[in-house]
Amino acid sequence: MKKYIQRYRVAIAITCLLLGACHKLDLTPHDRETDTEYWNKPESAAYMINKCYQGMNNAEEVLYADAMTDNAYTKVNSSHNQAIGNGSYSTADNYVRSVWGYRYSGIHQCNQLLDNIDRVPGLSDELRNRYRGEAIFIRAYHYFELYSKFGDVPFFTTVISIDESRTVGRTAKSEIVTSLLEQLSEVIDNNYLPASYDAENTGRITRWAAMGLKARMLLFEGAGRYNEVIPITNRIINEGGFSLHGDYEDLFTIAHENNAEVLLDVQYKPVDREHSVQYHFLPPSLGGYSQLSPLQELVDSYITLDGYPIAEAPSSSYDPANPFSNRDPRLAATIAYTGNSYKLADGSEHVVDSRKGAALDGFDFSSDASATGYYIKKYWDNTYRSNLMSGLNIILMRYADILLMHAEALAEQDQLTAAEWNRTIRPLRVRAGFSEPRALEYPAGGNLKEIVRRERRSELALEGLRHKDIIRWRIAEHVLNGWNHGLYTGEAVGTDNGYVRVENRRFDAGKHYLWPIPQSERDLNNSLTQNPQW
């Protein structure tokens, strides 16, 4: 498109020189393309849908989402979403305002394409419908991010003018959900999206991803919609052809991108499109700043190899003096702690020492060190270029999540049988490296709802999904109130039972389940009402 504009400007300039008096000519604007001209080119649709993809999500948004939960903490209060996690945000919060603007900008792009797709010449019906399906999915993704945080929001499916945007009110969340589910059903039922793509189109939205998003949205609605989740997840499991990648840790590496477990990811590419999110979480000894750190509460959530939560484990299973021994292998694959290591590109291991006072990576050693004594290991890319620039894809939806949604929908209805356990939770634990029967076999008589929720947390930790989970489960006031913690030092001052106090958080159940409508938006639009207690 930029090349076309430049050629257009040159042509107009030459015409002006030849004729001498451009102001007398009846010309279309020469500093930009008109709307009519733009959509008259076959390549315009491809350009616009690719632009929609770029605005769907990014590496920082996904990883920092866990800082709003009991999984992680970010130590820089002037950026990202620390205020959401600790409950200090307001109607003027920069992050809240950025989410609102970012998502509506993406919706506008999708609406532009959908409003004009039928005007684009030279497209086959199949390709036109594919573009339409992709845009409908991305728009639904944006709206899901909005209503899951703000509740009722302005809802429109065509391009609106600036004047209209200043008068449109909030649409009831229930109405938005109904409409989006219908739109996704249309995309799925009419096969707008293919089941798979060729190598040149790797990373595009498939029919299965559309089903996965629909299942997520239904799951977020909770009781009354669980029964609608199961047919969708069943179909993906039975017909989608997906499988769990053989090695949990390798799943998040460049060497194994786009494997058979991935339904949807944010596509990055070395040099052409990279992110620097590693700088935000790696230890100083690897060049990182550790602005984002896992919490002790996440560490403690991983079960033992024989299937016990550590609070219930016998001394033969869990030793507080050796807390990382005999634990769920996903802990070591997700979080770096003293004695754990990062594998370097040459095959060697970079061992972490995060004990208090230890050089470089030690807790309290410097402002660059982790505020919790733990570092993120998931999404470590040892093929990085200079300055930790990485082209590693960030997964938005994977088959493990489909299995967990299926298991949860069943468990919430007291329908998770041994057979369904063996289709869902058992394969996840086998892949993780469990072998003890007590961890693998169906826990008859156990609290299946809590077991599935804990499994979801361990499997999907630091993948940006925990925030929606604690909101839809209505447990945020239990996990986001009071001190969260870092590693065990044994000291009395500034600790709870020897665990470092990191941040004193507050979650008001009467207020914080919905974010405030940004005051700057309400100043522009008097039709926007505010959420309760804001």
Image (tube, helix red, strand yellow):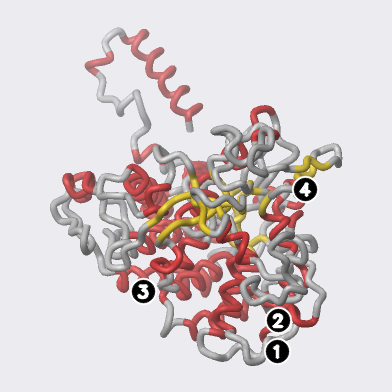
Q: Closer to the N terminus: mark 2 or mark 4?
A: 4
Q: Are marks 1 and 4 in contact (CB under 8 Å)?
A: no
Label 1, label 4: how far apart the Cα atoms are: 34 Å
Mark 1, other Cα within 10 Å: few <14 / some 14–19 / many ≥20 = few
Q: Which residue is mark 2?
A: 423
Residue 502 percent coordinates (x, y): 49, 49
Q: Which residue is mark 1?
A: 419
For the residues carrying marks 3 and 1, which lies nearer the camera in this image? 1
Q: Secondary structure at mark 4?
A: helix
For the residues carrying marks 1 and 4, which lies nearer the camera in this image? 1
Label 2, label 4: how far apart the Cα atoms are: 27 Å
Furthest residue toward right:
347
Mark 4, other Cα within 10 Å: few <14 / some 14–19 / many ≥20 = few
Mark 2, other Cα within 10 Å: few <14 / some 14–19 / many ≥20 = some
Mark 3, other Cα within 10 Å: few <14 / some 14–19 / many ≥20 = few
> Is residue 529 something that shows in the picture?
yes
Q: Are marks 1 and 2 in contact (CB under 8 Å)?
A: yes
Q: Residue 251 versus residue 171: which sits nearer the camera?
A: 251
Q: Amino acid at mark 3?
A: Thr
State whether residue 322 is above or below residue 436.
above
Q: Are marks 2 and 3 in contact (CB under 8 Å)?
A: no
